[in-house]
Amino acid sequence: MSAPILPPATLGVLGGGQLGRYFVMAARTMGYRTIVLEPDPGAPAGAAADLHLVAPYDDPEALAVLARECAVVTTEFENPPAAALASLAATTPVRPSPAAIAITQDRRSEKRFLASAGIPVAPFAVVDDERDLDVALRDAGVAFPAIVKTARLGYDGKGQVTVGDDAELRDAWERLGGVPCVVEQRLPLEREVSVVLARTPDGTCAAFPTVANTHVGGILDLTVAPAPDADDDHHAATDLAISIAVALDYVGVLAVELFVVGGRLVVNELAPRPHNSGHWTLDAAATSQFEQQVRAVCGLPLGDPSLVVPAAAMVNLLGDEWAEGPPDWSVVLADPGAHLHLYGKAEPRPGRKMGHLTVSGETGSQVAQRALALRGHARGGLQLDH
């Protein structure tokens, strides 16, 4: 096993969003130098890094800089070009591996991987072309209603359509561009939970407490940690997440999204990076998911993932909050149990993640209500949180 990567080594990251920004901030706090490769000159991570390479992810000159300067390279999103990762991996450690990222950036390969590993998933069918529309669902045992999801690039509810019969399925596939898709049977959900864990090159794992998630319009709206009344879910979900990380030979931070259906856990999706539902760790865990990412990719001992408060809640702040003008953060900042995070994005747009708000307290219901109320006050008291 290679020696740990220690400060002041240089760490590289592909992607310049808020996940990369927090990774860079954690790395710099620990004494590392950082380089971000991201084509957007105004990207949040680039503003925090020692060096921002403003170039496409597959730019040969920029990749050569990363390979020459970095002791390890990681990613903050799941869709970097496979050829770019392979090029880097030829000379520089890339964690998680290009092979693991390739599985998670295509829903077809992800579902097949999970099923082959014996991980419980919803009944699904792969639609590669129009011919599959007639036979794929019948052969796979998928019943309506179902959800059509594009194989690549869909996130935060994008690239997904719910359908109720064969005619709607064909229409949805055409509206999605006739691209390869996965069709999943829609399940009667009791709740949604997720596990964020870290795994080092020597196979050591550390999982944060299982959290409960609420989505609105396909976008994560509220996370409560720990998931209320879910001790059994936590142990089972953690075991599932660890088994997935082992099967992927994963190194880094991995998020596993799960459904609770009929009292059992079903894996929905994987995210090969820190996750929105882990943002609460910045303020309410002994080690944040971003410091854990630095530790994992550098081969350092993992930090303590425990909660340091009885309960915490995180609510997203989307561009919608700016619809009536800049939000008023005064009450949020006056609350001793609240922490405001804004990502430094210049242009608020509907559905765009501009920041988040974390509240700590005694119970999950209490902190969830406070977080929603504080967000409602900031947006001028608009009653959208129900």
Image (cartoon, helix red, strand yellow):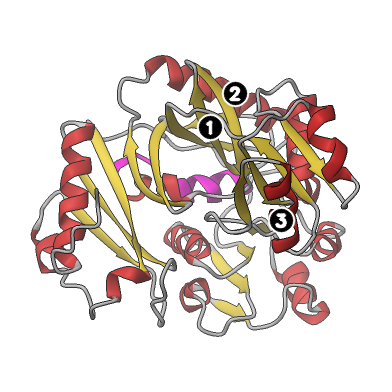
Discs 2, 1 touching: Cβ within 8 Å: yes
Q: Is 76 left or right of 218, judged from the image as shown?
A: right
Query: Tag on residue 220?
Result: none
Quarter of the rendering containing residue 360: top left
* Residue receiving disc 3: 171
Query: Tag on residue 258?
Result: 1
From this viewpoint, which residue is outermost toward the right?
Answer: 131
Read off the magenta span.
284-297
* Residue receiving disc 2: 240
Identify the residue at horizontal 31%, vertical 34% (top origin). Answer: 307
Q: Position of residue 319 (x, y in %)?
A: 36, 71
Few, some or many residues within 10 Å of mark 1 (<14, 14–19, 20+): many
Looking at numbered disc 3 in the image, what kind of residue is underneath it? Answer: Asp
Identify the residue at horizontal 31%, vertical 48% (top origin). Answer: 314
Q: Is residue 285 magenta?
A: yes
Identify the residue at horizontal 32%, vertical 38% (top origin). Answer: 224
Secondary structure at numbered mark 2? helix
Distance, label 3 to label 1, CA atoms, is: 28 Å
Quarter of the rendering containing residue 173: bottom right
